[in-house]
């Protein structure tokens, strides 16, 4: 499925990722945890193809090196990124956007496009998954959405796009407990033997709802520890101090606040 | 009729004062090109319009008058089955059949604007259409006035036409003006004179899409009675230099003017919006909502005035102008003009000039949408509010298609 080999990323000559290796098999859910500034979001956007990154290494999805592709071609190859900060797009209808997105990847893959009527059924199923009211589709993409609505809209998009690999970047940030439950149950419903996920998070809290197969600790741009879900519990108790060899400005030395047990 | 009788001209054409760059309202006009326009009595063109022209006209249900180079083309007009309460005629017929009505509304001495091009229109616009909606009638079908300029005439290259719209007390109507053309260098100079009775409502839509070889000069003068409502929708798309000037006079208490405009410049176009709304009575509201999309080395101009006269207490006026620059060479100029001489007035204005949001393009691309399509989607999103403001699917589709062409 996904093989990341010796991934190095710099932004404006500042090294952010420094030899990151990661293998994700079909159907697996991996959590990546780490302190602020460790490179978690950069990893997500290096996979997605954001401009302005100097990149070395490889990241192959089903044998295709994503790093050679334009962002839209990566989506067509089966990659989906759930944004930490979904972008507001005034004037662009959410339903139209979703259908354009789905048909763009279908066209790129040589599949037939889906008409407006058939798409309604697809959208309705996705809406139910994240407990969205029908009017949601008639609003502009993320414009004026609450934090929780934006994150639910990300999961809605994932449900419509049916990716091979979903990378969810801090999908739990800014969510109250009800929204977290809805988002997590949406994610769980989309788990399957042919779909892998990378869940990037600060907090163990999300992992109580989405039980990962593997947990990785990212510090200073590389994975310094991997384990099963109990590693997240260890981090909850001890913070990242065990894995940080030098002073990080913002590395927490106590259990992270905001987590629930 | 072919042309005006020459004896009319000397009286009407007083010594025109041509605007210069020093006139704020004409600062961005191409004065050299304007000087090359030769207005004059129109030689009527024989023969058919190019096929291309017919394809450019939105096909609306309802009556229509087509004006070609300033003269009504009866073969292309459809005045059959006019609904009750609507009179729609060419000037020549109105002069003959409704002399009083015609005389009352064709009097343009009320216009406060006296630049040379307004004077040219007064002198040379001998034909056009008159729309009269009788009191209390609601006309549902849009009334379509099509103005065509064919600049392949060697004696004059610029045509003038005049549209008069009168909506009596308590009546309502929708008038669509489509302005198109073909041929080489030339110009059109259109005047629309609108008066609304008390509690009358008019939706007035202008689709300006003349070829890029032509200059287009448009004036719309509106006078509103008490509690009347004017909803203007401008789509200023074509022309090398296309000017849309609106002067709206809120003369009766509680009148409302809601004027919106979209201009989309490509190539080297200059699209010039000159708007003044005069609050001349108490408790009137006005809105000016203009958006510009400017690509290549095009220039957009929005010069918007709110003029609150003494005694117009309780005025509520707002003006916004947002511009989207799609290229480094494109330029947006925006200037609000506010003069407030009354009490208890709410007056707001705001303007922005920005570019496409890179984060939004990236976001769309991560959803599989190719770069060019993402850009289109954002541009449509920017224009969407104004296109959606039109309550007619055929027109919405026509505009969306044109925006798609421009956005290509």
Image (cartoon, grey):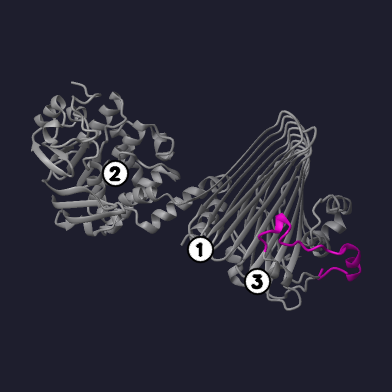
**Chain under disc 1:** B
Q: Is residue B143 left or right of residue A236?
A: right
Q: Position of residue A69 (x, y in %)?
A: 25, 58
Q: Secondary structure at mark 2?
A: helix
- Disc marking residue B49: 3
Tell which subunit mark 2 falls on.
A
Q: Which residues are magenta?
A: B1-29
**Residue occupied by mark 1:** B296
| Majority secondary structure of magenta residues | loop
Given residues A78 and B314, the one toward you in this image is: B314
**Residue B66 placement, left or right of A157:** right
Q: Which callout, 3 or 2, points to the residue nearer the camera? A: 2
Q: Which of labels 2 and 1 is toward the front? A: 1
- Circles 3 and 2 in contact, beta carbons < 8 Å: no
Distance from label 2 to label 1 (Cα)? 36 Å
Q: Residues within 10 Å of mark 2 (few under 14, many from 20)?
A: many
The x, y position of residue B339, in whole percent, is 73, 40
Rendered location of residue B408, percent (x, y): 46, 62
The answer to whether the residues at label 3 and label 1 have Cβ atoms under 8 Å apart is no
- Mark 2 lies on residue: A160
The answer as to whether the residues below labels 3 and 1 share one chain is: yes
In this view, the residue farthest toward the left is: A227
Q: Nearer the viewer, mark 3 or mark 1?
A: 1
Measured from the top left, where is residue A190 in percent x and y? 21, 38
**Residue B18 is inside the magenta segment:** yes
């Amino acid at each position: 499925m996904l093989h990341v080999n010796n991934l190095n990323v710099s932004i404006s000559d500042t090294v952010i990722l420094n030899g990151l290796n990661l293998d994700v098999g079909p159907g697996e859910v991996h959590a990546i945890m780490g302190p602020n500034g460790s490179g978690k979001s950069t990893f997500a956007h290096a996979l997605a193809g954001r401009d302005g990154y100097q990149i070395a290494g490889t990241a192959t999805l089903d044998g295709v090196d994503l790093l050679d592709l334009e962002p839209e071609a990566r989506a067509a190859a089966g990659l989906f990124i759930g944004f930490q900060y979904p972008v507001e797009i005034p004037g662009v209808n959410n339903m139209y956007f979703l259908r354009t997105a789905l048909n763009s990847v279908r066209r790129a893959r040589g599949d037939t496009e889906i008409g407006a009527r058939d798409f309604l059924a697809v959208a309705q199923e996705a809406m139910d998954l994240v407990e969205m009211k029908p009017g949601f589709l008639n609003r502009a993409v993320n414009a004026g959405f609450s934090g929780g609505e934006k994150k639910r809209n990300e999961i809605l998009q994932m449900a419509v796009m049916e990716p091979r690999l979903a990378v969810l970047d801090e999908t739990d940030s800014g969510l109250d407990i009800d929204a977290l439950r809805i988002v997590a149950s949406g994610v769980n419903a989309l788990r399957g033997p042919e779909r892998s996920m990378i869940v990037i998070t600060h907090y163990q809290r999300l992992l109580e709802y989405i039980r990962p197969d593997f947990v990785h600790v990212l510090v200073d741009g590389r994975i310094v520890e991997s384990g099963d879900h109990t590693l997240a519990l260890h981090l909850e108790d001890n913070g990242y101090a065990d894995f940080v060899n030098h002073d990080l400005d913002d590395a927490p030395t106590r259990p992270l606040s905001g987590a629930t047990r | 009729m072919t042309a005006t009788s020459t004896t009319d001209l000397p009286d009407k054409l007083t010594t025109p004062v041509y605007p210069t760059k020093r006139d704020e309202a004409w600062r961005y006009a191409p004065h050299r090109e304007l000087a090359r326009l030769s207005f004059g009595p129109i030689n009527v063109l024989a023969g058919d319009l190019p096929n291309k022209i017919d394809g450019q006209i939105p096909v609306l249900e309802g009556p229509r008058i087509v004006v070609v180079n300033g003269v009504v083309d009866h073969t292309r007009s459809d005045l059959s089955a006019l609904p009750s309460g609507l009179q729609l005629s060419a000037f020549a017929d109105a002069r003959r059949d409704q002399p009083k009505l015609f005389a009352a509304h064709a009097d343009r001495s009320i216009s406060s604007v006296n630049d040379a091009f307004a004077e040219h229109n007064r002198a040379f616009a001998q034909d056009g259409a008159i729309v009269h909606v009788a009191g209390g009638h609601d006309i549902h079908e849009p009334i379509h006035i099509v103005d065509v300029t064919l600049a392949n005439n060697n004696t004059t290259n610029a045509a003038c036409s005049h549209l008069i719209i009168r909506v009596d007390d308590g009546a309502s109507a929708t008038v669509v003006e489509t302005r198109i053309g073909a041929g080489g260098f030339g110009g059109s100079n259109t005047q629309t004179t609108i008066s609304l009775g008390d509690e009358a409502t008019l939706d007035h839509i202008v689709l300006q899409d003349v070829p890029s070889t032509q200059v287009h000069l448009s004036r719309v003068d509106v006078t509103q009675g008490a509690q009347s409502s004017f909803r203007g929708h401008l789509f200023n798309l074509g022309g090398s230099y296309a000017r849309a000037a609106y002067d709206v006079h809120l003369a009766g208490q509680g009148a409302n003017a809601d004027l919106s405009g979209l201009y989309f410049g490509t190539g080297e176009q200059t699209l010039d919006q000159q708007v003044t709304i005069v609050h001349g009575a108490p408790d009137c509201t006005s809105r000016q909502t203009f958006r510009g999309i400017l690509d290549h080395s095009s220039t957009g101009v929005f010069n918007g005035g709110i003029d609150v006269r003494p005694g117009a207490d309780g005025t509520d006026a707002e003006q916004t102008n947002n511009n989207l620059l799609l290229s480094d060479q494109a330029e947006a100029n925006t200037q609000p003009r506010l003069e407030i001489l009354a009490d208890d007035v709410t007056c707001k204005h705001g303007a922005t000039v920005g570019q496409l949001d890179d984060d939004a393009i990236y976001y769309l691309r991560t959803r599989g949408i190719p770069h060019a399509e993402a850009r289109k989607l954002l541009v449509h999103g920017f224009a969407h509010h104004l296109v959606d403001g039109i309550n007619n699917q055929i027109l919405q589709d026509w505009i969306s298609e044109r925006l798609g062409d421009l956005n290509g």
